[in-house]
Image (cartoon, rainbow, N blue to C red):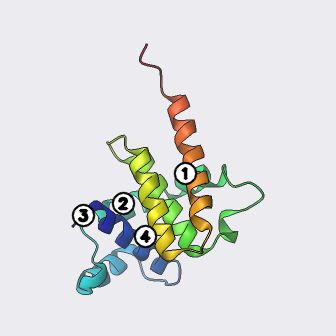
Amino acid sequence: MKRRTARENAILALFEASFQANTIEEIIADSRENAEVAIDAYGEALLMNFYAHSSEVDECIAAKLKDWTLARLPRVDAAILRIAVTEMLYTEEDMDSIVINEAVEISKKYAGDEDYQFINGVLGNIARDRQAEQPSAE
């Protein structure tokens, strides 16, 4: 499975979890039975990392929301942001630009017409802050 599909399916599972009392493990198991939105190992790792670090991820997102709270965001936007920020913060690879691009493309598919701009702005601000925090290579 391509990473874009893995990300998209992880976002859909997290979106689904926002409506259900099922555990993420149950949602992953259910998704594997439904081949259309199956969660692979990469998607499962994203979901498990989000649940392991959800308060840190949510704080990171909340810090970039101007005059908004995470609770006021559409659930699909929150799911997209949460998976993208989880991937940015808790994977070994430095690929913020790829993660942002994929999140924008997924938001164009599932979110409101102009939501991709909001997603891009929030994630871009997080990426810039992360880059500024890293020691320079000089």
Amino acid of disc 4? Ile
Side of 74 where 19 appears, left or right: left
Amino acid of disc 2? Leu
Amino acid of disc 1? Leu
Residue 85: image location, x then y, percent: 48, 53
Which residue shows up at 59% across the image and 49% down it?
Answer: 60
Q: Which mark is residue 2?
A: 3
Q: Determine which residue is flagged by label 4.
A: 11
Question: Of marks 4 and 3, which one's residue comes earlier in the chain?
Answer: 3
Q: Determine which residue is flagged by label 2.
A: 46
Which residue shows up at 55% across the image and 30% down it?
Answer: 132
CA distance separating discs 4 and 1: 15 Å
CA distance separating discs 3 and 1: 22 Å
Q: Determine which residue is flagged by label 1.
A: 123
Q: Are marks 2 and 1 in contact (CB under 8 Å)?
A: no
Side of 82 where 67 appears, left or right: right
Instruction: Give the SS element for disc 2.
Output: helix
Identify which residue, 35 or 23, lies in the foreground: 35
Question: Of marks 4 and 1, which one's residue comes earlier in the chain?
Answer: 4
